[in-house]
Amino acid sequence: MFRFIALFCLVHVSFGTIIRGRVLVNGDANIVDMVPSGSQLIVRLEDTSIANASSIVIKQTEISNIVAFPFYYQIQVPNNISSALSYSLSALIKKGDVLVYVNEQHIPVKIGTESLITIDIPVMFIGEDRSLKPSLNNMKQSSWPELVGREGTYAVQYIKEKTGFTNVFTVLEGSLVTMDYRTDR
């Protein structure tokens, strides 16, 4: 029994804590909305212990070439941070140097003994240029019957040109593809 407890403690220390969740438009998991092609998602774990001072970035993850909400993120929390301090998450989406989406509310993170923390981050559109906010509802076409029988590489290129999507690929018949294979499209 003692060996099991010691092994469990070592496993927790070696893996640490993982924070994961979704980045959602206005906090609504049912909204599926596109972002401008070539956008980048940045999620930060920040130390917010000192009031009225700038936060300190503890860990940051960046995901490039994102396509449509919701986005999934994961951050490995460093083992050397103190559970007595205050931490929060922030998320932003940029297209080049232009900020397009940002979270505007405090997202507290309680670091404790949990090895997995799940937190969704709501973001809102802040871009002034409405062309930076494409919508799936404005898509004129969602199926391409003219591509039936065509070569897969041709179909992929055709759909990329028509939609502006960057992550288009073919899936072979019989492949084990599920809804959570690529959740960012």
Image (cartoon, rainbow, N blue to C red):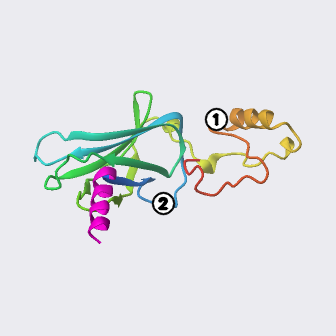
Residue shown at the point (27%, 62%) measured from the top left: 6
Examine the structure image and report whether residue 5 is included in the region drawn in magenta. yes
Q: Residues within 10 Å of mark 2 (few under 14, many from 20)?
A: some
102, 50: nearer the viewer = 50
Q: Pointer 1: what residue?
A: 164
Tag count in the figure?
Answer: 2
Disc 1 residue type? Gly
The x, y position of residue 159, in whole percent, is 73, 38
Label at residue 19 = none
The x, y position of residue 134, in whole percent, is 56, 42
Give the magenta part as a residue range: 1-15
The x, y position of residue 81, in whole percent, is 19, 47
Q: Quadrant of the N terminus?
A: bottom left
SS state under label 1 = loop
Question: Which secondary structure class fits the magenta region best?
Answer: helix
101, 78: nearer the viewer = 78
Q: Residue furthest right?
A: 149
Q: Pointer 2: what residue?
A: 29
In the figure, 142 relative to 153: above or below? below
71, 11: nearer the viewer = 11
Q: Residues within 10 Å of mark 1 (few under 14, many from 20)?
A: some
In the figure, 29 relative to 67: above or below? below
Disc 2 residue type? Ala
